[in-house]
Amino acid sequence: MKDDVSGFNARAEELLERYAGLVYRLAFARTRSREGAEDVFQEVFLRLVAKRPQLETEEHEKAWFCRVTINCANSYWRNPFRRRTEPLEAAEHLPAPETAESGLDACLDRLFPELRVVVHLYYYEGYSTSEIAGLLGKKESAVRMRLMRVRRQLRDYLEEGGDSCV
């Protein structure tokens, strides 16, 4: 039993080293905050330790980490703590943001999370539309449609001179 635990711990460390960057980048793309990405990152690796999934191939490993990261990020946003709202008057005393974001990154920040995750998987992680469809549980045509919408929004943004975004 002890050998099994130490063997799994070594395997979990190996997986952590291999997929830490992927998980963090995907979590950040989904949450758009460092704190949110760190929370999701931690949850993904806690699930790895708790569930001990049988991951036969490297493709299966990568797909498992992507799927679990997306699920954890979705759970992150469903948390009632993040849904709390306050009356607008409660924000009167808060200072305005110091710097306005601009450029492509600001435009990506304004995308719906469903669009942002597709962009991240396609352009940053190099997945094909069929692979993304499998990871997200969507039809491939839905993934292609989301990519088309993002491209159109970005093109419009760039044609307008970047003054406004989506």
Image (cartoon, rainbow, N blue to C red):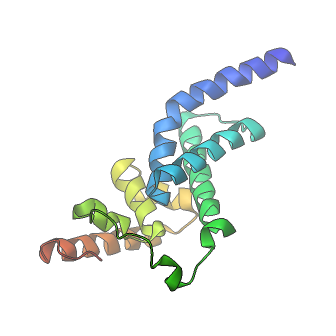
Q: Residue at x 54, y 34 (%)?
A: 58
Give the quadrant of residue 95.
bottom left
Q: Is residue 155 above or below residue 69?
A: below
Residue at 63% in and 74% down: 84
- Which residue lies at the image location 51% right of the left edge and 69% below the top edge? 139
The x, y position of residue 43, in whole percent, is: 65, 46
| Image height of 119 relative to 10, above or below | below
- x and y percent of residue 21 in the render? 46, 38
Q: Is residue 138 visible?
A: yes
- The answer to whether residue 79 is seen in the rendering is no
* Residue 17 in the image, given as x and y percentages of width and height: 52, 28
Q: Quadrant of the N terminus?
A: top right
Please state if 126 lies on the left or on the right of 83 as rendered. left
Find residue 118 and report its horizontal and vertical position in percent.
Answer: 43, 61
Residue at horizontal 39 percent and vertical 47 percent from the top: 125
Seen in the image, is 47 located left or right of residue 59? right
Quarter of the image with the C terminus in it? bottom left
Nearer-the-camera pick, 15 or 165 = 165
Query: Count the marks: how many?
Result: 0
Extreme-front residue of the structure: 93
Q: Is residue 163 above or below residue 117?
A: below
Extreme residue toward the top, this view? 3
Residue furthest right as drawn: 1
